[in-house]
Image (cartoon, coloured by chain):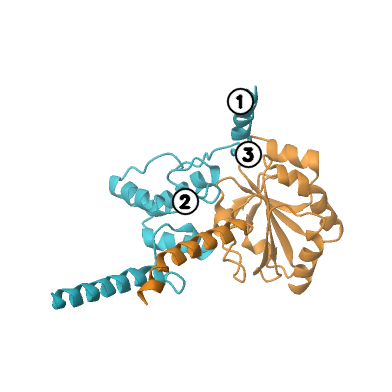
Amino acid sequence: MKRLLIWGPLALFVFFVGLAAYQLTQPKDDLIRSTMVGKPVPAFELPSLQEAEPVLTQAIFADGTPKLLNIWASWCAPCIQEAPYLEAMKEAGVPIVGSALKAPDGTNLAFLVEHGNPYVAIADDAYSELKVAIGSSMVPETFVIDGQGVIRYQHLGPVLDKDIPVLMAELEKAQ
Amino acid sequence: MMRILILTLALLAGPALAQPESSNAPYANVQLDDAAQEEAALELMETLRCLTCQSQSIHDSDAAIAGDMRHQVRTRIAAGEDPEAIRAWMVDRYGDYISYEPSVSSTTWPLFAIPLLLLVFALGVFWRRMRKT
């Protein structure tokens, strides 16, 4: 018995080295997902990016049509990458609400001129109020929101060609 | 030559990863006038985790989102909200990830239970040995 027991510490050591080696070879997933999926869009009240007057609230998501909410900023390189795909979704008839984070004066508007404007409305979220309230951690990020204003799906990172069918299916489900 | 090249690349890589803008929210970098409220805010900010710089608290980080979150914490505390209510609000959005404050849950209970069990086991062994001698 004692003879066998002497191997215990070595066995434990090998087990932990093996565990560490296994974990090191696993792909890293450090995405922080929102736990707001399934809940209604939080109440917000933000000025519009383009117009002086209109104020955007959560009411924009409660008109019966499922929409996308896209969080972006002029300084975000992947936002340039996703611009043509958002444009394609707009052309397919998907209403996209934008929420622009703080950027140097005027650059968000310049971004729309340069890379196109796929949005039906854009909130000016200069202090990340909506971003934090909805549990978004990355830029860009896209949420599928159903016609009653309930968050149905979160897409982290840029929307690319391969993501369009997924988002379309989620929008269909949200009908 | 190689060293210079690596150093130059390192210098280039740093700013490329950094967020181009830090927050300009009013309370991102301005303390509250009420010292007690500021202290409560500070305590909370030190235990809320930054979203983009994952090993820092929002108090430590200069990322724009961390500044915006400090602004939110301070304005809410100034409005009389309880710090733990603000933490719960954040956890509602980002899950346990966002809080550095350890909490007992269905996944973390072994972390709290194992030390206690080991202590009981060690005391048992100790007690048996003492009885023998």
Q: Which chain is cyan?
A: B
> Which x, y percent locates residue B61?
47, 43
Query: Can residue A52 be seen at all in this image of the molecule?
Result: yes
CA distance for labels 2 and 1: 44 Å
Which residue was labeled with disc 1?
Answer: B3
Label 1 residue SS: helix
Residues beneath discs 3 and 2 located on the same chain = no
Q: Mark 2 belongs to which amino acid?
A: Gln
Q: Where's the C terminus of chain A, which quadrant?
A: bottom right
Q: Mark 1 belongs to which amino acid?
A: Arg
Q: Mark 2 lies on which chain?
A: B
Label 2 residue SS: helix
What shade does chain A have?
A: orange
Q: Mark 3 belongs to which amino acid?
A: Ala
The earlier-in-sequence mark between 2 and 1 is 1
Which residue was labeled with disc 3?
Answer: A103
Identify the residue at image location x=60%, y=33%.
B15
Residues at marks 3 and 2 touching, judged by CB atoms closer than 8 Å: no
Label 3 residue SS: loop
Residues at marks 3 and 1 touching, judged by CB atoms closer than 8 Å: no
Between disc 2 and disc 1, the foreground one is 1
